[in-house]
Image (cartoon, rainbow, N blue to C red):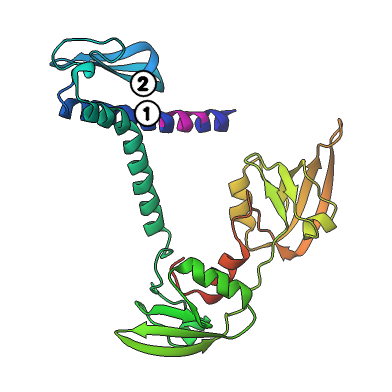
């Protein structure tokens, strides 16, 4: 119940912030266009904060899932100077479109921040190489620009993903630009095996899906089973604990089956396999080969 409330609170706060910047966009442009704003409010329900400005009343209400920017002459035509209805059509269009524009700009800012913090996806320039992997062994260096692989032009990391996926067990021909000089290399992506159980959990350690043909399915584990213990250590519904404690260990897991009205427990031997529990399938084949095998960008 508590995780649900925390998640709900996060969603409410996020929506409240998006509403705030949306309505603030209307307010700012209206002020710039000298249109009178009578009231600016975020949320609905009882007012918990109120302040009177020079011409605008600012309010914060209890439930931050709505808001409005009330302008003079917005709903009914007004002849008052500075009313919305007296503003020129271009100004009215700017005011009306300001909220959506702010949201779009915010989305773009978040996108570029995430892209810049999770690695070099949008260029073809090497950030770094990893010890013991193919990129370092052939001599690739920081700030090298990958121009071509197997004759295909490279513009960004996604182009590399597609080619490496098709040639994961084959040598590839790379054309590199380094300080204005063109160099050519031959490399074979380093093979890195990835072992997993094939189990997908929700945030309460309930199994929501099992990959077909996976070790878990071969042991008889099914969707709607619940993970109770790993190596005789109780999980207590903490999925993150299961991942942290057992991501690199062989494990014997105990599952409670809740498919029937009565519950029964099972001991499932998952030895020879590394516990690698995922909420969702985050790792595509191309990313696995690029990040785990080739390793020329930051993790």
Q: Give the residue pinned by disc 1.
A: 19
Residue lying at 78% horizontally and 44% vertically, measured from the top left: 223
Q: Give the residue pinned by disc 2.
A: 67
Residue lying at 69% horizontally and 66% vertically, measured from the top left: 195
- x%, y% of residue 187? 54, 86
Q: Residue furthest front?
A: 89
Kindly tell me whether residue 272 is visible in this rendering.
yes
| Tag 2 and tag 1, C-beta contact below 8 Å | yes
**SS under mark 1:** helix
Q: Residue 96 lies in what quarter of the image?
A: top left
Residue lying at 31% horizontally and 12% vertically, measured from the top left: 75
Name the quadrant of the N terminus: top right
Viewer-closest of 130 and 117: 117
Residue lying at 51% horizontally and 83% vertically, measured from the top left: 151
Dot 2 or dot 1: first in sequence order is 1
Is residue 251 rendered to the left or right of residue 170? right
Q: Which residues are magenta?
A: 8-13
């Amino acid at each position: 119940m508590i995780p649900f409330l925390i998640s709900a609170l996060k969603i409410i706060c996020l929506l409240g912030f998006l509403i705030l910047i949306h309505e603030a966009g209307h307010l700012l442009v209206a002020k710039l266009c000298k249109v009178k704003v009578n009231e600016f409010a975020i949320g609905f329900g009882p007012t918990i904060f109120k302040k009177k400005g020079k011409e605008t009343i600012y309010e914060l209400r209890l439930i931050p899932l709505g808001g409005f920017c009330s302008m003079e002459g917005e709903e009914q035509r007004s002849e008052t100077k500075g009313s919305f209805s007296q503003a020129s059509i271009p100004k009215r269009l700017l005011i009306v479109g300001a909220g959506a524009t702010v949201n779009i700009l915010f989305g773009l800012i978040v996108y570029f921040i995430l892209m810049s913090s999770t690695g070099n996806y949008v260029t073809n320039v090497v950030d770094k190489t990893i010890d013991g992997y193919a990129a370092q062994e052939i001599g690739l260096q920081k700030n090298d620009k990958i121009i071509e692989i197997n004759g295909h032009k490279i513009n960004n990391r996604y182009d590399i993903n597609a080619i490496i996926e098709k040639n994961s067990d084959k040598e590839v021909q790379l054309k590199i630009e380094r300080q204005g000089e063109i160099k050519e290399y031959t490399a074979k992506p380093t093979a890195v095996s990835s072992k997993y159980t094939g189990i997908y959990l929700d945030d309460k350690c309930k199994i929501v899906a099992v990959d077909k043909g996976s070790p878990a399915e071969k042991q008889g584990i099914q969707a709607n089973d619940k993970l109770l213990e790993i190596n005789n250590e109780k999980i207590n519904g903490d999925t993150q604990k299961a991942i942290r404690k057992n991501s690199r260990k062989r494990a014997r897991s105990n599952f409670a089956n809740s498919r029937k009205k009565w519950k029964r427990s099972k001991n499932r031997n998952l030895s020879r396999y590394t516990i690698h529990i995922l909420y969702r399938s985050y790792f595509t084949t191309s990313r696995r080969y690029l990040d785990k095998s080739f390793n020329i960008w930051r993790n």
